[in-house]
Image (spheres, grey):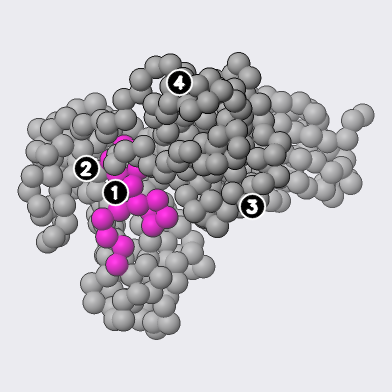
Amino acid sequence: MTPFATKIASPSVLGTKTSATGKLDHTNPADVYSFDGRKGESISIGLNAVSGGSLDPFLLLLDATGNVIASNDDANANTRNALIANQVLGADGTYTIVATRFALGIGGTEGNYSLSLTRGRTINTAATAVPNATAAIAVATSELGAGLPKGSIEAHLTWNARADLRLWIRDPQGRTVYADVPKIDSGGTLFRSNNLGCKTPNGTNPDDYIYWNSAQAPVGTYEVKVWQNANCGDTVPVSFVLTVAVRDSAGAAKQIINVTNVPGPNKQVYLTTFTVDSNGNATAGLGDYVVGQFTENISATKSSAPTILYNQTVNGSITASTKYVVYSFTGKAGDKIRITLRARSGNLDPVVFLLSSDGSTNLTYNDDAGDPDLGPQDSRINYTLTADNTYYIVATHYGVTIGGTVGNYDLQLVGPAR
């Protein structure tokens, strides 16, 4: 607790509140709260990661003298969220909650969290059983390859060289399965990633495999990423094959994605999507490389683009049919502007572009701002205008036309007051 001593000495007082929210990252690996408790009182504390980050929550409870009397990493085998359940307090006094992450200050996970404090009610800590989960994985080998477990979703990435390729899937709630987060609550599990960090000494059949350990795939749209993290000193030209199969309500597997391609340069991501309905029927979306450029032609929509003024905030939505929204504003040379795009609902992963007056020249863009005042995936642009003119802002999501995240947003434009 030594690195957190200053915060422990000045905690945020919960008082009558029973919940709190915050963000943990490399600059803020812990938040500290306090509450008054009575001897014999039963309390439970939950720390849950909010969609969009990689956070692996960890909880500690300290008594009035600063001793750790309880801690938890994972509430049960099906989650990485933390729960100190049904803790009976030993004395009257002020107790301290440390909301942090696995490995505390040296941990690498980051993201928003929600903290809850429950008094006097028994909390069930058992893992929630998945109906028919045993039946879903009763056959030890899937159709995609020998030794791979069966699941409601089966994604297999294979390639031909020693390079370190990565497979990443985001579920409809915004939770991601990949090397840093190998298991998520919806059932997604990274079963194999056998050349992570260039471990394999040769190029013999390297592969990644992600599957969902559930009877039926959760409904919604999924995003799938493939990228080359390193070539591992191998000079062999790399190509990969990505296959995704989804099982319907009858348990029949249907291969919906089968792509052969080459990884993009400098860790450039290949992105595709698929959508599962309530009957387990799945359809694949478009696939392409994410280039960090807005390439759609907006010449026909510029005249009808809604106007946003300096120091104004507007609201909007990104949906499956509305992949981006264009706004216009008038600025002068030398104006220092700030554009912030915040997700407000859904699993939206916001991306914002600033375009020139012709609507076709990309001036700048931002994917994840990394600003402690924003959510882990919110975006922000700081830019100085070079001419008196009309400019265009594009509010969109990761991947623009091929992306799959949706939700409401706030768009704020800050500039000089006139």
Q: Give the mark nearer the N terminus: 2 vs 3.
A: 3
Mark 4 packing: few (<14 Cα in 10 Å), some, or many (20+)? few
* Residue pointed to by mark 1: 189
Q: Give the mark nearer the N terminus: 4 vs 2.
A: 4
Whether residue 58 is visible here, answered yes or no, is: yes
How far separated are the C-alphas under marks 3 and 4? 31 Å
Q: Nearer the viewer, mark 1 or mark 4?
A: 4
State which quadrant residue 311 falls in: top right
* Residue pointed to by mark 4: 40
Three-letter amino acid code of the residue under disc 2: Asn
Q: Nearer the viewer, mark 4 or mark 2?
A: 4
**Residue lying at 28% horizontally and 73% vertically, measured from the top left:** 160
Q: Give the mark nearer the N terminus: 2 vs 1.
A: 1
Residue 166: image location, x then y, percent: 38, 61
Magenta residues, as a range?
178-194
Whether the residues at callouts 4 and 2 have beta carbons within 8 Å, the answer is no
**Residue lying at 81% horizontally and 30% vertically, measured from the top left:** 310
Whether the residues at callouts 2 and 3 have beta carbons within 8 Å, the answer is no
Tag of residue 213: 2
- Residue 378: in magenta span: no
Q: Nearer the viewer, residue 405 or 91?
A: 91
Left/right placement of residue 6 relative to residue 55 reads right
